[in-house]
Amino acid sequence: MFRIFGLIFLVLISVSCDTQSKEEQEIEKISIDLEVTRFDKKFAQVTAENLPELKAEYPYLFPEKFTDSMWMAKATDTIQQELNVEVEKAFPVFSAEEDGIYDLFQHTKYYFPSFNTPHVITITSEVDYRNKVLLTPDYLFISLDTYLGKDHPFYIGLQEYLKKNFEKDQILPDVANEIAEKFVPQPESKTFLAHLLYYGKILYLKDKLLPKVADSHKIGYSEEELEWANANEEEVWRYFVERELIFDSNTDLYSRFLYPAPFSKFYLELDSESPARIGQYIGWQMIRQYMDKNKVSVQEMLSTRAETIFNKANYKPKK
């Protein structure tokens, strides 16, 4: 009997891997016209003589309200020059990141054929960590000075929960997040469930767009934080259920369990041990179970209401 069950299990695993392999083979065939411009390097070499040419080539990066003298003052500012030096040290070439972005765009095009490949432009932004990556219909801007490593002197004074993701390996997850936000509809209600599943959908899209990236990087957790979330999934879910938070519309729940912070806020002694955004993690697991149990496409899942997903997922946290 055990041998039969073992054989069935191996067959199911084989079929699943074969399906995944065929899907990846189709994705690899997708051609992407990827253009990457190291504008950070170009601006680092700007002079009063070639500034007009640079402005003509990239007018969208030079707002007209700023004069040429102001741009040159910025270019020769000691802080900007330090940024240029440090970014050049960290990113003398960008080939590995380009390969990752190409693969990400292939996956995006596979799941969303209407996706138009943006022109990728690397910049410096005086460590504007609120806009590390910015996606527009035509351009994808990546601020390289926000990916110099969490211990870089530029980040002294910033809180640990912010700078822990100022690493090179967070570029792809951040880009994927920007892309996912373009395809995931905003929550249809103020309930905690609707917002929890909104982030769950984004993280599930990152599963599909970044199949080779570790879960910890997708959600921006350290390995220890992910281990805590995995180990305490059942207790967290019980806390939400017993306090009747699932269908609660109190927006304070967003900052407690969904938004970036030093930790999640259960108002218990364990708070300091918990990672922030634990509600996003729970929403992610619920979407994963919903997709495992229901034969629906990614696009269908994205347009499905939170209550329907909740009911059909029959979510059972890991013990």
Image (cartoon, grey):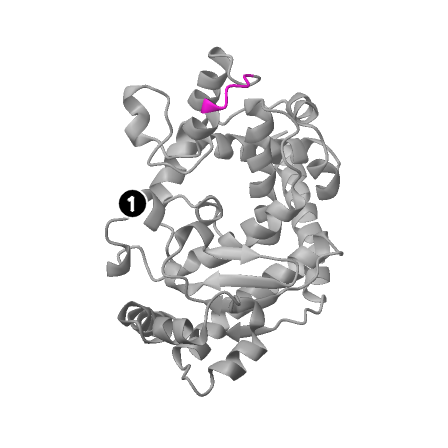
Asked if residue 212 shows in the view, the reply is no
Q: Quadrant of the N terminus?
A: top right
What is the magenta range? 248-252
User: Which secondary structure lies at badge 1?
Assistant: helix
Q: What residue is at 47 percent from the left and 50 percent from the top?
A: 214
Q: Determine crowd level at label 1: few under 14, some 14-19, many 20+ residues with C-alpha closer than 10 A.
A: some
Place of residue 136 in the rendered image (x, y in percent of width and height, measured from the top left): 61, 57
Q: Position of residue 60 (x, y in %)?
A: 57, 67
Residue that extends furthest to the bottom in the rendered view of this protein? 49
Q: Which one is nearer the viewer's eye here, 256 or 124? A: 124
Q: Is residue 18 above or below residue 293?
A: below
Q: Is residue 310 magenta?
A: no
**Residue at 34% from the left image edge and 33% from the top image edge:** 263
Q: For this view, does 16 lie left or right of residue 211?
A: right
Q: Position of residue 273 (x, y in %)?
A: 30, 31
Residue 30 versus residue 12: which sits nearer the camera? 30
Task: Determine whether, in the image, residue 317 is placed left or right of residue 124.
Answer: right
| Amino acid type, label 1 | Glu
Q: Residue at x 57, y 72 (%)?
A: 59
Tell me the residue that label 1 is attached to: 160
Give x and y (percent) for residue 264. Answer: 38, 29
State whether residue 98 appears in this view: yes
